[in-house]
Amino acid sequence: MSTYRITRDIPLDESYDILVAGGGPAGTAAAVSAARLGAKVLLAEATGCLGGMGTSGLVSTFGPVADGKRMLVGGFMRELVESMHQRGSLGPHVTAEFLHTQLNRWVPFKPEALKRHLDEMVQDAGVDVRFFTRVIDAEAKDGRIEGAVISNVEGYRFIRAKAFVDATGDAQLSALAGADCHLILRDNDAVAPSTLCSMFTGVNWDDPAYGEDWRGIDKVKAFSKKQLQKAVDDGFFSQPDRFMPGMNKIGKHAAQLNAGHVFNLDGLDSRSLSDGMIHGRKLAVEYMEFFRKYIPGCEEIDLLTTAPLMGVRDTRRIVGEFELTIEDFEKARQFPDQVAVYNRPMDNHPKDTSEKEYQRFVKDFEGFHGLGEGDCLGIPYGILVPKGWENLWVAGRCHSSDSKVHGSIRAQSAAYMMGQASATAAVQSIRTGQPACDLDTWDLVETLRTQGAYLPQTTLTREMTRA
Ligand SMILES: Cc1cc2nc3c(=O)[nH]c(=O)nc-3n(C[C@H](O)[C@H](O)[C@H](O)COP(=O)(O)OP(=O)(O)OC[C@H]3O[C@@H](n4cnc5c(N)ncnc54)[C@H](O)[C@@H]3O)c2cc1C
């Protein structure tokens, strides 16, 4: 429970059908999907744009969207990525083949373009968006949230709603309401590292080292790995991190860099976050110098900006009606109540700079654990429902899974799909009176299919899969 007390002094704002907390991938998809189904939606976002990590965090690559044979993402996410492709908002090398059929290809995009796409989508759907607005408290009783307190330039406001979607990444609304949550280190001996991502210009992508099309990426990656090892051996870095950062082509001379681990950062501690931002900015300069010195085509590379938001991979997750585990991932398990399917490898980054941790990461990541061509893992409804709650759902990073699976399905592509599913469930709940924790999942799956979700399960059930 929070330390604030909600008092009558806090003015009552309008009432809504659904309050969505957080406008990242999960929250934006949730807000748009609910509004398209006719709900009156308030989307409260702490920053000044939508997209979350993809924009404010400069994590400008969607995790894989296909399984090597077909596109796995459907509904909102498919609409978004295809519209971005048509309008030239993805990396210039992204072809239809790359997008629709490739296994384990991250899809780079221009973050400013994503902001505009999402602005248009929320406006077209009629979502009431409040930027610079943070959800700071909640009033809840017996598994129901009555309302939440938002804070912005107008002061505090109390928002009543029939249903709530927590898409804060940190399960912040759930924790404020008193839902049971797991903190990092529950099933892990070290915190997943954070990374402050950055934007660069001056890359000569026409350098022969990069090859002619996206197929050259693998060659460059292999070469860059060798150069990174050389730089580490040369004592070039203040932090000898063996993890090869992703440098993604997002424009003619532009690149996004996902590099510079900030180890042991606690994303729920403002001091730790602040120290991490300073450390991350220092590392970004070192990586610029590394690329200039060691990588062909990057002699003129220049750092334009680091992200305004720290790239925090993991903080707090709900205790859900169901928890997805590594055993499910390894079996590529399918569920009758799955609301999305996905297949990104477990991207559980090294937790320190040791060779041992680096080898553990490579084994997890490159081993794929059974998710090869044509395989996918089902994302069951119950991982979006805080255990026992009636009008609260989560979506995105704060869903219920163990730390290993989390490294796969925390991806933006999956977060957009979870957002659509949780909002569709919330609208069904408002219309039928079914509580979140006892929703008819047969109807939910069928509604999601009509919205374009790819849900290949052949058996449906009215009850969700439970632990
Ligand atoms: C360094 C890094 C690299 C990554 N690489 C990739 C990648 O290459 N591809 C990929 O697909 N995924 C990647 N991911 C994972 C992915 O970006 C996130 O897991 C994903 O963005 C989660 O989506 P989300 O909507 O749950 O949360 P977020 O993207 O974190 O969005 C949460 C939003 O909620 C807002 N918010 C938070 N608290 C409140 C509050 N109390 N009130 C109102 N608003 C609030 C935040 O401002 C933010 O906009 C990476 C993540 C990191 C950190």
Image (tube, rainbow, N blue to C red):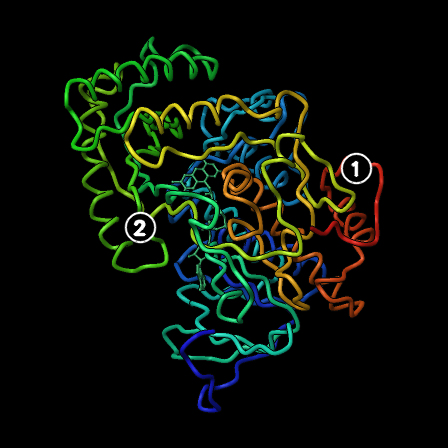
Is 116 on the left-hand or right-hand side of 332?
A: left
Of the residues shown, which amino acid type is indicated by label 1?
A: Gln
Label 2 crowd (10 A; few <14 / some 14-19 / many >=20): some
Lower position in the chain sequence, tag 2 or tag 1: 2
Of the residues shown, which amino acid type is indicated by label 2?
A: Pro
| Ligand 1 contact, mark 2 (Cβ < 8 Å) | no
Q: Residue at x 48, y 46 (%)?
A: 187
The residue sitting at the bottom extreme is 8
* Looking at the image, residue 257 lies above or below residue 420: above
Give the number of marks. Answer: 2
Q: Which mark is residue 308?
A: 2
Which residue in the structure is indicated by mark 1?
457
Label 1 crowd (10 A; few <14 / some 14-19 / many >=20): some
Q: Secondary structure at mark 2?
A: loop
Residue 199: percent from left, percent from top: 30, 36
Q: Secondary structure at mark 1?
A: loop
Residue 413: percent from left, percent from top: 56, 40
Pointer 2 with pointer 1, Cβ within 8 A: no
Of the pair 267 and 387, the residue shown nearer to us: 387
Is 327 on the left-hand or right-hand side of 336?
A: left
Q: Residue at x 46, y 14 (%)?
A: 213
Of the pair 336 and 259, the residue shown nearer to us: 336
Residue 135: percent from left, percent from top: 46, 69
Q: Residue at x 71, y 58 (%)?
A: 425
Q: Name the image quarter holding residue 91.
A: top left
Q: Residue at x 80, y 54 (%)?
A: 463
Residue 230: percent from left, percent from top: 22, 15
* Looking at the image, residue 284 lies above or below residue 149: above
- How far is mark 2 from mark 1, CA to CA? 41 Å
| Ligand 1 contact, mark 1 (Cβ < 8 Å) | no
